[in-house]
Amino acid sequence: MHAYDTLLAHHVTLHLLHGYSQPGYAMLWADALLRDLDRQPPAFRQGRLHFAAGLLRQALMLHPFDDALRGLVNTLSRMAPPSPEYAAWLRGVEACFGEHANVPSNEALGRAYDLPPSPDAVLEAVRVAVGSASHGDAFACLLRLWELGSWEHMAAGVTAFMATPVASLVAPLFAHAALAAGDDDCAASCVAVSLPSPLLTLYHARRAHAAGDRDGARDLYAQALAGEPAQLHLLRTLDDLDRPAPPADILAGKRIGIGFYTWNKFEVTLDTLRSLLASDTGGATIAVINNGSTTFSREDFETAVRATAAGRPVELIHLPVNVGAPAARNWLWHLDSMREADLFAFLDDDVLLPQDWLRCYVQDMEEHPGTVVVGPKGVNPGTLPTVQYVARFFEKTGRHLIRFTNNAPLVMDFGQYDHARPCLSVMGCCHLLDRRACQRLGVPDFDIRFSPSQVDDLEHDIQVWKAGGMVRYDGRVRVVHRQDAGRAAPLSEAAWGHVWGNHHKMERKFTEEELASIDRATRRADARDLLATYGRTAPRLPAAARMLAGLCVRTLQAAAE
């Protein structure tokens, strides 16, 4: 038997990837942790019990309408008592229901997801469910609206739901949605009727954080952790509060190249260029490839780029045909104008960038030597931004087998992905590469066998780890990726065939042993990073959070080492 609990390590890893684990996952994982509990050593028994209870408690905050989930939380509360704040919230949930019917979350969510992916249709379902007092179904439809990303529809649904006698249970969730949409009035109305809960405290912490009140945010994050210690992602959030913003002059004297390529996206590409030029790029050299576009003329595009640049130097290359994404990346990488660059940033042609993205990336590389690639938190466009892409790891590897963790384990944004961490791979729509480190380590170019696109940037990150470099995710950098493939552009059968064909090629490029070694390296780097984070934050953590976090961090560290 291992000296550490391998099963606990596995489920802590999954929970940290999700940030908040939804009810179905939480109940499945808790069942695995608690099964045959009496046969485990005492140390394993206590660890599994407390972590499973925390998983279920945080899941109930996301869906308090689920009778079965609430029953499990109540049962485990006798062995792993919740905080006084959580216990008071749970009593409020019990009192709020009374005679009001509620249903298992999987049934209500199943009906919500059987609806057409139309905000109008889902909003109508909310109103019908509210009218018939089917509160669990109305809530599930509101979660579906959140995923669809239309704040106009979500806000109308929230307004309808606020008239129900159970609105106070889930109003904190809606406050987080309003925060993401920038609707302060709706957020305030949700807060006004909310039952006090750790999720409500988290909302206030995020508001203070966004307003620059670091001391207030630090106290409120700690209170949220005291209310529910299973919010493990808050360790890194608390640690980031002590991290200074990247200095204004951090780009001074650095040789940086920035490039992107486009195919048949005229206005969208110009929007990306405007966003890039409005951000802080220091004295970076910028290049754009027109990758064989056929829907506009070379002359019209050149005129538009020059007008958008308004005197800023932008190197523009016109290719006669579309050479594909990896070849276009390599073309940019090897331009004469870029050969002297120390760092190179690749963008997609459909992104909107925050002002300080490049400064944050350079700070990451300076603070974490050995980092070769840094990438962002990708969000979907829309009036209610949702999570599109965050840090990824291997989920499973084997002989000619690669499976990755979900690119967006939870699309609802509670700030659970706003921190930084090492990872296997980051989103390629806006990532910075250390060009000199790539040359020194012998990292290969992007593989043109993945043309015209798909997995070329992901596979390149794997090559970085194979060569001895590291990849880092920075959730401070929030990039709007307008492709929005998950909602607006469902893939055809032919397109899926292309994706899986390229994935099949990638699986054959690495041996089983190489994949296992890379997996160990990424998880070891992440565990060491989390251990260091815990060491810095532990003295300020509430006692219950320090106990649970310490148990989880030490288990992960033992497993990784």
Image (tube, grey):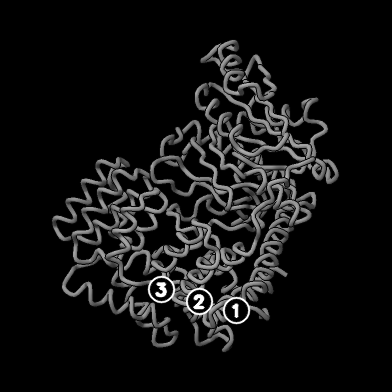
Asked whether disc 1 touches disc 2, contact meaning CB atoms under 8 Å apart, the reply is yes
Give the residue displayed 65% in from the left and 61% down from the top.
243
Give the residue displayed 73% in from the left and 37% down from the top.
344
Q: Secondary structure at mark 3?
A: helix
Cα separation, mark 1 vs mark 2, equals 9 Å
Image position of 392 with respect to 8: above or below: above
Where the N terminus falls, by quadrant? bottom right
Whether residue 144 sits left or right of residue 495 in the image: it is left
Give the residue displayed 50% in from the left and 83% down from the top.
37
Where the C terminus falls, by quadrant? bottom right
Task: Give the labeled residue for mark 2.
Answer: 51
Residue 288 location in percent, x, y? 65, 25
Image position of 401 with respect to 236: above or below: above
Cα separation, mark 3 vs mark 2, equals 10 Å
Marked residue nearer the N-terminal end (1 or 3) = 3
Q: Secondary structure at mark 1?
A: helix
Image position of 396 with respect to 115: above or below: below
Give the residue displayed 50% in from the left and 51% down from the top.
408
Asked whether disc 1 touches disc 3, contact meaning CB atoms under 8 Å apart, the reply is no
Task: Give the labeled residue for mark 3.
Answer: 57
Under mark 1, the amino acid is Leu
Task: Give the labeled residue for mark 1.
Answer: 551
Q: Secondary structure at mark 2?
A: helix
Whether residue 134 sits left or right of residue 391 in the image: it is left
Cα separation, mark 1 vs mark 3, equals 18 Å
Marked residue nearer the N-terminal end (1 or 2) = 2
Residue placed most toward the observer, 516 or 434: 434
Residue 31 falls in which quadrant of the image? bottom left
